[in-house]
Image (cartoon, rainbow, N blue to C red):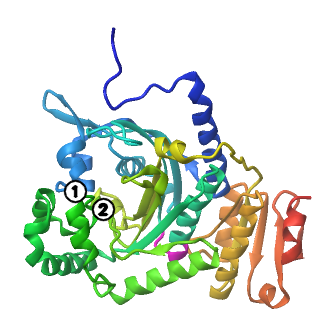
């Protein structure tokens, strides 16, 4: 009798409805944030991940499924970010749209010891946004992750955030860690001793007990951050506060992949045990350029589906509605616009806004290209009067609406 490969799982008919519900909720929630689905191959060139993830990372050194075909080396994808960026560049998407929102659902593969919620073939739900370095976008992506978990009927999770800073900041942080851990090197595990010279930031992510004790004693602050990165992270936190997203500032939080810079975050759940991460993500502002594309800001995250199912409550919510496009004119209006977007989405109304700094004319043109049902305009005059200008893109009708009557008007 044949048996399944260790570290894989058969999803039987009795379970498939749970998976279908997760996928249905995923598609509906991403639609509210105006994301489009992308599907990349399961097999990629090995060198794509060597370059993007970093040769010193544990995934590249120990966990990739390598496929050798004469002189070619391929691998089963261990994660999706590098694949999405490769597809973005190869298909010249940046030539038709300088700002893109993608989401994906699908299997990933890592050659590691199977454990609770951690298989050799596992499934990710994730997203990637390419084309902006705005702090408000960081907050939207983290808020989106929070919204997805609520829509999945998951509670009791914690959102932890940190900033690694730019490439120079990361080097400074590495030097700070090496100085702080030099006298403690003998107490670290073999893996962390190897990381000490080549990739000291990975020591902060070690799950080994003695290493965790040494790391807990480190006084890590934000002195490695340049002023621009400090300002960026301050704005991210302010936007999250404005959206009422609960989070913990976690200065020891790093991501295990080399491409991360700036804002990083991880969402954990006590119900998963020692390996408690439901998902994680962050900025990777240098990756698009490093893989041969333009110099563009980017951010994303991924959830492990198997882990979501382990902590999910029986209930789930599906949302639907037509797109409302918000145009904010001026910095004060942008801050108010963040709150309006959040209110719309919480009332099952799909909404999006401009993160590229377009003019009013350019933003209206984009709203038309997106086939938005309504456009909301908020500027200095609207703020003074406590209204928004609402334009029906199908009839051409335009009128001012009191903010507290907006949801009622859109649902008529």
Query: At which x and y percent is residue 128?
Result: 47, 56
Mark 2 vs mark 1: which is more N-terminal? Answer: 1
Q: Secondary structure at mark 1?
A: loop
In 3D space, how far apart are the residues under numbered discs 2 and 1 (Cα atoms)?
8 Å
Local crowd size for mark 2, using a 10 Å CA cut-off: few (<14), some (14–19), many (≥20): many
Dominant SS in magenta: loop
Q: Is residue 67 left or right of residue 78?
A: left
- What residue do we see at 36% from left, 89% from top? 227
Location of residue 271 with respect to 389 vertically, above or below = above
Nearest the camera: 16 or 387?
A: 16
Read off the magenta span.
132-136
- Marks 2,1: beta carbons within 8 A: yes
Q: Is residue 304 left or right of residue 70?
A: right
Q: Is residue 41 left or right of residue 333?
A: left
Whether 263 is among the magenta residues is: no
Local crowd size for mark 1, using a 10 Å CA cut-off: few (<14), some (14–19), many (≥20): some
Query: At which x and y percent is residue 197?
Result: 10, 68
- What residue do we see at 28% from left, 74% from top? 216
Whether 133 is among the magenta residues is: yes
In the picture of the structure, the residue carrying the numbered disc 2 is 259
Instruction: Inspect this view and state whether residue 127 appears.
Output: no
In the picture of the structure, the residue carrying the numbered disc 1 is 54
Query: At which x and y percent is residue 105?
Result: 50, 42
């Amino acid at each position: 009798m044949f048996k399944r490969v260790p570290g894989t799982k058969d999803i039987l008919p009795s379970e498939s409805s749970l998976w279908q519900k997760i996928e249905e909720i995923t598609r509906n929630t991403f639609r509210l944030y105006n994301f489009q689905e992308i599907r990349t191959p399961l097999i990629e060139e090995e060198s794509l991940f060597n370059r993007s993830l970093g040769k010193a990372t544990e995934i590249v050194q120990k966990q990739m499924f390598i496929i050798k075909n004469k002189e070619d080396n391929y691998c089963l994808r261990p994660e999706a970010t590098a694949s999405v960026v490769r597809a973005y560049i190869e298909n010249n998407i940046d030539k038709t749209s300088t700002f893109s929102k993608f989401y994906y659902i699908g299997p990933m593969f890592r050659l590691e010891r199977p454990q609770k919620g951690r298989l050799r073939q596992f499934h990710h739900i994730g997203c990637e946004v390419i084309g902006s370095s705005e702090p408000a976008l960081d907050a939207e992506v983290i808020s989106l992750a929070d919204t997805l978990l609520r829509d999945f009927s998951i509670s009791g999770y914690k959102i932890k955030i940190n900033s690694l800073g730019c490439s120079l900041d990361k080097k400074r942080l590495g030097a700070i860690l090496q100085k702080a851990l030099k006298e403690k090197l003998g107490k670290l595990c073999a893996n962390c001793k190897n990381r000490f010279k080549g990739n000291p930031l990975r020591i902060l992510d070690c799950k080994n007990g003695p290493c965790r004790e040494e790391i807990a004693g480190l006084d890590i602050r934000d002195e490695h951050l340049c002023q621009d990165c400090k300002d960026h992270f301050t704005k991210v936190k302010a936007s999250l506060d404005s959206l009422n997203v609960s989070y913990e500032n976690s200065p020891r939080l790093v991501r295990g992949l080399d491409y991360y810079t700036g804002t990083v975050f991880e969402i954990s759940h006590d119900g998963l045990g020692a390996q408690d991460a439901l998902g994680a993500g962050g900025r990777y502002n240098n990756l698009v350029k490093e893989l041969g594309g333009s110099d563009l800001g980017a951010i994303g995250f991924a959830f492990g589906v198997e882990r979501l199912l382990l902590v999910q409550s029986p209930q789930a919510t599906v949302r639907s509605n037509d797109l409302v496009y918000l145009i904010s004119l001026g910095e004060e209006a942008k801050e108010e616009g963040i709150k309006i977007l959040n209110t719309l989405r919480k009332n099952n109304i799909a909404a999006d806004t401009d993160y590229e700094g377009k003019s009013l004319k350019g933003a209206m043109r984009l709203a038309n290209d997106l086939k938005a049902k309504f456009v909301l305009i908020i500027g200095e005059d609207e703020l003074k009067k406590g209204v928004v200008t609402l334009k029906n893109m199908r009839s051409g009708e335009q009128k001012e609406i009191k903010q507290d009557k907006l949801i009622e008007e859109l649902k008529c």
